[in-house]
Image (spheres, rainbow, N blue to C red):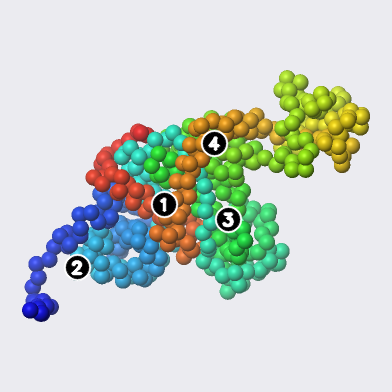
Amino acid sequence: MMGRQASGQDRLFYSFNLEDHVPQNHLLRGIDRCLDFGGLREHLAEHYSQIGRPSIDPELMLRMLIVGYCYGIRSERRLCEELHLNLAYRWFCRLSLEDSVPDHSTFSKNRHGRFRDSGVFRWLFDEVVRRCMAAGLVKAEGFAVDASIVAADASSQRGVPGTDLVDWKDPALCTRAVREYLQGLDAEALAKVVPKKISLTDPQASWTAAIGGPAFYAYSTNYLIDVEHGVILDVQATPAHRTAEVDSTKVMIERVQAQFEIKPERLIGDTAYGTAAMLSWMVNDKGIEPHVPVWDRTQRDDDTFSSSDFTWDEQANEYTCPQGHPLRSQWRAFKIERSHVTKADTIVYRASQHDCSTCPMKQRCCPNTPMRKIARSVHEAARDVARKIAATEQYERSRCERKKVEMLFAHLKRILRLDRLRLRGLSGASDEFTMAAVVQNLRRLAILVPQGPPSQGTGAPA
């Protein structure tokens, strides 16, 4: 017999418990067990007035943002609508069926105001990392670093060549992102490098392009992860420049060491992090094994001798060519001793013109120059350390572990839908990248430690 649905909307009273309608295996239940906002009010105390009307609970807004980033809800207006309807979202945000949802404009005011001034997103990120450490998910033996480009909220049509003069005092351009850019110019002299194209909407965004793809304005999110379980230990927003991405590695490692008192035994990265200066910093300054390919342009593809075909003599401070002739940085004594270090941090070693002119292998060595020259980096010793490590089995394992960073970036863009920023300026990018990293760590913690981490202590690395 065909049945009919009994109408239940005409009842006056209901017995309804929100707790009973959220499944026990729901992701938000696991995340809720991993969160601890105990120190939030103390952290934000000086940014709230002691008098006046009580504000919206900052914990509520942070919980709402976590829901938005966790489920890829990019619009704050839509987030408020979803929170109004979704029972699990209400349960996670500690809202009853009768409690009202904050207006979407509240997020904007707090994000660009007290939240950013107080660094609450960084505080929350650090607290989540401590929870991961307490749960034993951080081994602190190997770290991996990488960067990924994320499109900025800036149209390619609203840009001018970097050589053009722009009247930034024009009221039409007086936005928060522009003011932040101008402050950066005064404080850090960002104008030393003239960009190819600059956005009038978000001047700090870089004009960049992937190989074979169209150019666009973008920022880079830089991750430093522990390779044991893929926990993000630090995140840094930078313009989409390779130099800025590499330099951010030093900032992140120093910050992790100061914040959590941990330092890796090895650092894994791609060729971009294999510059001589970076390798020297890892080996000599930090005592970290560089599991990084060496950035090397000395190999030749025209059948002539490369630098590796010459023998280096550390004691004599000279190279020896395949014919047994020396290459030296100086061939005579100077009254005033010279370092011979160039602006590129190299020392040029030259062969004798007489030796080269009579050498039977000149056409295979220096066919277009009167003598052979080799530019040796002042950090060559650190480069040699990286080359030796590259021949080990541990290095091959590190190459595989580096993919964990790329998997996080894929998750960031495909699952969390952060393939384009909504906030402008470097500070806006930093806020978005930090909150996304918080959610990625929370999801991992909720899955790997379903019972939740210990309530006290940061725990020692596993």
Residue topped by disc 3? 240
The residue that appears at 35% across and 70% down in the rendered structure is 78
Residue at image mark 1: 437
**Residue for badge 4:** 291
Q: Calculate the distance from the C-alpha at mark 4 to the C-alpha at mark 2.
A: 54 Å
10 Å crowding of disc 2: few (<14), some (14-19), many (20+): some
The answer to whether 64 is drawn above or below residue 441 in the figure is below
Q: CA distance from mark 3 to mark 1?
A: 18 Å
Q: Residue furthest top?
A: 315
Where residue 435 sits: x, y (%)?
A: 40, 55
> In 3D space, how far apart are the residues under numbered discs 3 and 2 (Cα atoms)?
44 Å
Task: Please report the residue visible at 27 percent of the width from the left and 62 percent of the height from the top.
Answer: 89
- Circles 1 and 2: CB distance less than 8 Å? no
Judge whether 246 appears above or below 171 on screen.
Answer: above
N-term-proximal mark, 3 vs 2? 2
Pick whichever of labels 4 and 2 is earlier in the sequence. Answer: 2
Query: Which residue carries the number 2 mark?
Result: 97
Q: CA distance from mark 1 to mark 2?
A: 30 Å
The answer to whether mark 3 and mark 1 are in CB contact below 8 A is no
Label 3 close to label 2 by CB (< 8 Å)? no
Which of pointers 3 and 2 indicates the residue nearer the eye?
3
- State left or right for residue 381 relative to residue 237: right
What secondary structure is found at the residue carrying circle 1?
Answer: helix
Name the amino acid, label 1: Ala
Front tag of 4 and 2 = 4
N-terminal label among 3 and 1: 3
> What residue lies at 31% left-to-right and 71% top-to-bottom?
81
For mark 4, give the secondary structure. strand
Asked whether the residues under the numbered discs 1 and 4 touch, taking CB atoms below 8 Å apart as contact, a structural biologist would say: no
